[in-house]
Every structure is written in C-alpha cells, then in structure tokens.
Image: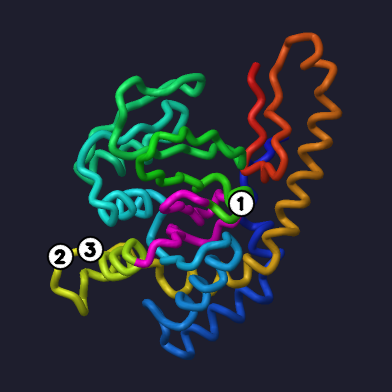
C-alpha cells in the first residue's frame, strides 16, 4: 500500500467549494497581481503571527534573500547544518558567506547575522549574540507566534502545513524600514528609484487561496497534534528499547513533519 506524503487531491476536495469560488471571482474581477487579496492576506498574516507588518512574496527562499538585502547584511551569516540547501543558497545569492554550525553548538567567531531554522514545526533555540536574527520559519507555521527577531520568513509551498497551489512565501516584521524596503523590492522598486529590485511577488490567486486556508489552519494544526499523539503512544515501546528516537514533545509544536530517527 502506497501512502502519499501529501495528498493534494484530498486537500483540494476539502476546500473545493471555496477554492472554486475564489478562482472564478478572481478571473471575473481580473485581479491577478498585487490586488486587494494580497493586501488582505498580508493583514491577516501579520495578525496571525503577531507582528505589525507582513509582505507577501513568491517563495520562502526569496523571503530569506530579501530579508538579508533589507538589513544590508554583507558579511558572514550563521545557520545550522540541519536545513534544506535553500537557506544556504539564499545567503550566497544575497552576497553573504554562510557559516554552518552543528545543532549542539555554535560558531566560535561572531557573525554578522544569524538564521535559526525551525524544522518540522519545532522551534530552534536562538543565541543571544547582539546581531540581527532572521528566522527561517518555513516549516514552522503556527508554531512561531509574537516573535522578537527582526524578520521571520515563511513558505506556503504546496507541501507545507499551510500550503496552497503553487510557490508562495512571505516575511513578517515589526521593523517599518524592512517592511517598506521588501515591499518595494519585490516589485522592481516601481515607484521608488533607490534600487533595481526584482520580481518576487506572490500572485493574487495564491493570496486568495491562503485567505481560505488561514480560516482552517488552526484546525489543521490541532489534527496534526492529535495524530502525533497517536504516533508517540504507538511507538513508545520501540523508543524505550532504544531502537528509534521520536521527535521532541515541544509545547506548541505543529508537526509540519513527524521525523523518526532509526
């Protein structure tokens, strides 16, 4: 029996009525890029995370890249070796040098910025180094609330807990300068000639679908936590024998994935 990692058909059928209505509405309005749905999603996202601002973007990778650009980071950036290579790629593409550290320790020299990566819905510790912190929360939607770091980066890729039907991402922040810079950069600084910028926009359709998904995301998280409890109970005997290691039972963990070490 083959069990799909993500059942996209099931996800669509669950929200089909609302998704289909959104698709028809957007096409009838002709609102495709940076319209009211994007603005409304940004407001809802900032409120959900607990920040003043949010900027809808094309991917979580772009979110990390733009966060570094907005903060003017040009030197060394510390990030854990336990992450997907997109985190490192964003650092390099922003003109910075990645400095990898092991999950049990930290780099000896003081970097110019730190990117903690929250894997599988589990929040990672953040070292107090007096440098800008950019949180890679692409796998931690719902787990990270009321953050104190300067920027938080999110992904809504289809396989994510709050995924939609294409590439999409965002940043949240309480810093007005970061907010304004990224908001203009994502659209080529069309109304501002201070820089060239690029195309890093979230299309209007994904924003509208996310407005649907946000209504149910807490229910989705609650169900994942219930299933995780089943796994813990069903596999505790194997763990007690030292045959496997289960994920930590961190309070508020959202279980983007349930990773078992064998």
Q: Is residue 100 above or below residue 86?
A: above
Q: Can the viewer see residue 168 in this picture? A: no
Residue located beneath label 3 in the image: 198
Q: Which mark is residue 196?
A: 2
Q: Is residue 50 left or right of residue 27?
A: right
Residue drawn at the location 63% of the way across and 53% of the way down? 142
Image position, residue 16 (x, y; %): 66, 70
Q: Nearer the viewer, residue 208 or 57?
A: 57
The residue stretch that appears in magenta: 148-176
Mark 2 → mark 3, Cα distance in angstroms: 7 Å
Nearer the camera: disc 2 or disc 3:
2
Q: Quadrant of the N terminus?
A: top right
Callout 3: SS: loop
Q: Is residue 197 above or below residue 94?
A: below
Q: Is residue 16 above or below residue 26?
A: above
- CB of mark 2 within 8 Å of CB of mark 3? yes
Image position, residue 136 (x, y; %): 45, 44
Residue drawn at the location 72% of the way across and 40% of the way down? 251
* Circle 2 residues within 10 Å: few <14, some 14–19, many ≥20: few
Residue located beneath label 1 in the image: 161
Q: Nearer the viewer, residue 133 or 81?
A: 133
Residue 61 on the magenta span: no
Q: Can the viewer see residue 8 in this picture? A: yes
Q: Main secondary structure of the magenta part?
A: loop
| Mark with earlier residue (1, 2) | 1
Rendered image quadrant of residue 139: top right
Callout 1: SS: loop
């Amino acid at each position: 029996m083959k069990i799909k990692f993500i059942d996209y058909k099931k996800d669509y059928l669950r929200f089909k009525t609302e998704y289909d209505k959104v698709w028809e509405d957007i096409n009838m309005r002709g609102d495709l890029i940076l319209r009211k749905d994007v603005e409304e999603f940004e407001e809802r996202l900032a409120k959900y995370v607990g920040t003043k601002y949010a900027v809808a973007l094309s991917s979580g990778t772009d979110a990390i890249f733009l966060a570094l650009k907005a903060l003017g980071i040009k030197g060394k950036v510390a990030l854990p070796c336990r992450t997907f290579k997109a985190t490192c790629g964003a650092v390099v593409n922003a003109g910075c040098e990645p400095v990898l550290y092991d999950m049990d320790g930290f780099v000896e020299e003081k970097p110019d910025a730190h990117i903690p990566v929250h894997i599988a819905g589990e929040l990672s510790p953040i070292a107090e180094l007096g440098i800008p912190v950019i949180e890679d929360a692409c796998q931690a939607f719902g787990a990270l609330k009321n953050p104190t770091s300067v920027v938080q980066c999110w992904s809504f890729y289809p396989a994510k807990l709050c995924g939609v039907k294409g590439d999409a991402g965002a940043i949240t922040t309480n810093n007005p300068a970061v907010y304004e810079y990224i908001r203009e950069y994502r659209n080529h600084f069309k109304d501002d000639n201070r820089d060239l910028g690029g195309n890093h926009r979230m299309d209007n359709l994904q924003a509208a679908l996310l407005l649907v998904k946000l209504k149910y995301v807490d229910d989705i998280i609650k169900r994942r936590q219930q299933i995780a409890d089943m796994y813990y109970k069903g596999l505790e005997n194997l763990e007690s024998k030292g045959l496997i290691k289960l994920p930590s039972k961190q309070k508020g963990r959202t279980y983007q994935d349930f990773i078992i070490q064998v």
